[in-house]
């Protein structure tokens, strides 16, 4: 044990007894060990010397709160989109580590997932609208990597709104990032499949929450709440979920949050066999199932947090411009947007910020996927595209 884990205190005569073992290690003022714990005190002279120059080390019990990983704090400007991409790469590497034949050292997977989770928390606090933009715009990573990152961002927004304590939030984010772990080997194939699922595939899907929990246990994850949420993230209030068909209060509140994030992001993500479902239709679908499949209060909170037009969604304005939502406002019908294409179809040299509260720039409709254009999201948000956090800018 290191001396910094102890508090040195002056020895008084009544603490030492002749022919008795000393109850703690004794040091001099420079930290040199004079007598080990359990050594026998043999004489009055020895007692006198130790009383005069000795110090005993009392172990300092760490505050449990201080051991809980905290959200990352950014001291300088960063590009949330580049950071999001970097976290996707880290998650992909973590999945590869889990799938290796050799079991990683205890605690490694837990530490890596917590690290991604605390960075997501920091980025959400730094610029939540940009993170929501990444949820709707990022498309360069495979579904099994991008989808859990989307879930984690949305879950963090809800956890923050509910003011959930950090220890629980970490478990929720870790569960969001790993709840589909057992599906990873099949995900790409299923993602591209155009035919209906066969019975064998459906059985694989319905078993994956429990199998994901088992995989995490096998690599040393011992966070009980994390594991429980992974097992429950596909349960529904009416008992139609899986794998156990839990109902109502048998499903943890945190698992209900994950279910909302999972369903929404699955719907708005494009598949080879279909275009993404329009975000408004996705929100309407969730809204109509509140109280039956989804928790009513959490559903309303979730929808209110996203707004009618979440950041990252393409919209057409009354004046004919094509724009991307870049910020939420107190009015859910009038978000801040960045116009990228003129009414005549020509592109703006640089995005133009528009206040959709103005009649001319009001949102006329959400756009179909084929109306979108390829553009660096950092440009839409006016952010330097260079990833800055390679330099020591974290607290």
Image: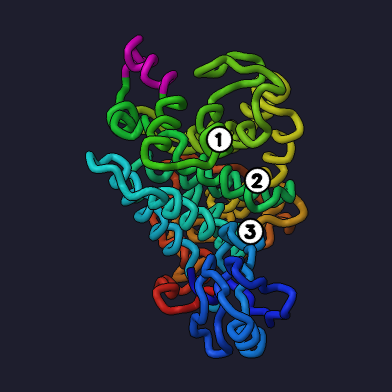
Cβ atoms at labels 3 and 2 below 8 Å apart? no
Residue at image coords 55%, 81%: 27
Q: Nearer the viewer, mark 3 or mark 2?
A: 2
Q: Is residue 267 left or right of residue 287?
A: left
Q: Locate residue 376, reporting x and y percent.
A: 41, 62
Q: Locate residue 103, reporting x and y percent.
A: 29, 43
Residue at image coords 31%, 51%: 93
- Residue 306 circle label: 2
Please check the rendered image and state whether residue 196 is part of the magenta-colored stretch, yes or no: yes
Q: Is residue 186 left or right of residue 387?
A: left
Instruction: Give me the C-alpha separation between circle 1 and circle 2.
Output: 11 Å
Mark earlier in primary sequence (1, 2):
1
Cβ atoms at labels 3 and 1 below 8 Å apart? no
- In the image shown, does 260 or 355 lie closer to the viewer? 260
- In the image shown, does 86 or 112 lie closer to the viewer? 112
Q: Locate residue 39, reporting x and y percent.
A: 52, 69
Instruction: Give me the C-alpha separation between circle 3 and circle 2.
Output: 10 Å
- In the image shown, does 258 or 286 lie closer to the viewer? 258
Under tag 3, what secondary structure? strand
- Where are the magenta residues, as a range? 195-207
The quarter of the picture where the C terminus appears is bottom right
Please check the rendered image and state whether residue 25 is part of the magenta-colored stretch, yes or no: no
Residue 5 seen in render? no
Cβ atoms at labels 1 and 2 below 8 Å apart? yes
Secondary structure, magenta segment, majority class: helix
- Residue 264 circle label: 1
171 to 183, vertically: above or below: below
321 to 44, vertically: above or below: above
Mark earlier in primary sequence (3, 2):
2
Label 3 belongs to which residue?
327
Q: Is residue 328 left or right of residue 278?
A: right
Residue at image coords 42%, 50%: 107
């Amino acid at each position: 044990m290191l001396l910094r884990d102890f508090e040195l205190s002056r020895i008084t005569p009544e603490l030492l007894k002749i022919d008795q073992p000393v109850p703690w290690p004794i040091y001099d003022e420079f930290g040199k060990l004079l007598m080990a714990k359990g050594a026998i005190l043999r004489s009055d002279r020895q007692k006198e010397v130790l009383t005069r120059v000795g110090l005993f080390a009392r172990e300092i019990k760490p505050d449990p709160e201080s051991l809980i990983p905290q959200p990352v704090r950014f001291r300088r400007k960063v590009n949330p989109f580049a950071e999001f991409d970097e976290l996707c790469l880290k998650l992909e590497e973590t999945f590869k580590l889990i799938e290796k034949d050799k079991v990683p050292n205890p605690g490694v997977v837990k530490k890596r997932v917590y690290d991604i989770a605390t960075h997501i928390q920091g980025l959400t606090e730094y610029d939540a609208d940009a993170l929501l933009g990444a949820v709707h715009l990022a498309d360069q990573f495979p579904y099994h990597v991008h989808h859990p990152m989307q879930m984690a961002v949305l879950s963090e927004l809800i956890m923050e709104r509910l003011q959930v304590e950090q220890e629980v939030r970490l478990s929720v984010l870790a569960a969001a990032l790993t709840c589909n772990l057992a599906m990873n080997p099949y995900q790409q194939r299923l993602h591209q499949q155009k035919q209906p699922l066969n019975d064998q595939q459906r059985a694989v899907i319905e078993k994956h929450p429990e199998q994901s929990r088992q995989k995490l246990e096998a690599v040393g994850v011992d966070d009980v709440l994390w594991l429980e949420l992974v097992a429950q993230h596909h349960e529904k209030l009416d008992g139609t979920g899986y794998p156990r068909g839990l109902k109502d209060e048998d499903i943890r509140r945190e698992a209900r949050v994950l279910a909302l994030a999972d369903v929404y992001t699955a719907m708005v993500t494009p598949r080879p066999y279909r275009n993404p479902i329009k975000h408004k239709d996705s929100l309407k679908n969730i809204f109509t199932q509140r109280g039956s499949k989804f928790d009513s209060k959490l559903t309303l909170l979730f929808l209110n947090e996203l707004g009618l037009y979440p950041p990252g969604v393409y919209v057409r304005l009354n004046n004919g411009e094509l724009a991307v939502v870049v910020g939420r406002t107190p009015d859910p019908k009038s978000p801040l947007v960045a116009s990228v294409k003129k009414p005549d179809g020509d592109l703006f040299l640089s995005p133009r910020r528009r206040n959709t509260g103005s009649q001319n720039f009001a949102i006329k409709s959400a756009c179909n996927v084929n109306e979108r254009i390829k553009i660096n999201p950092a440009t839409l948000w006016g952010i330097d595209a260079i990833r800055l956090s390679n330099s020591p800018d974290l607290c």
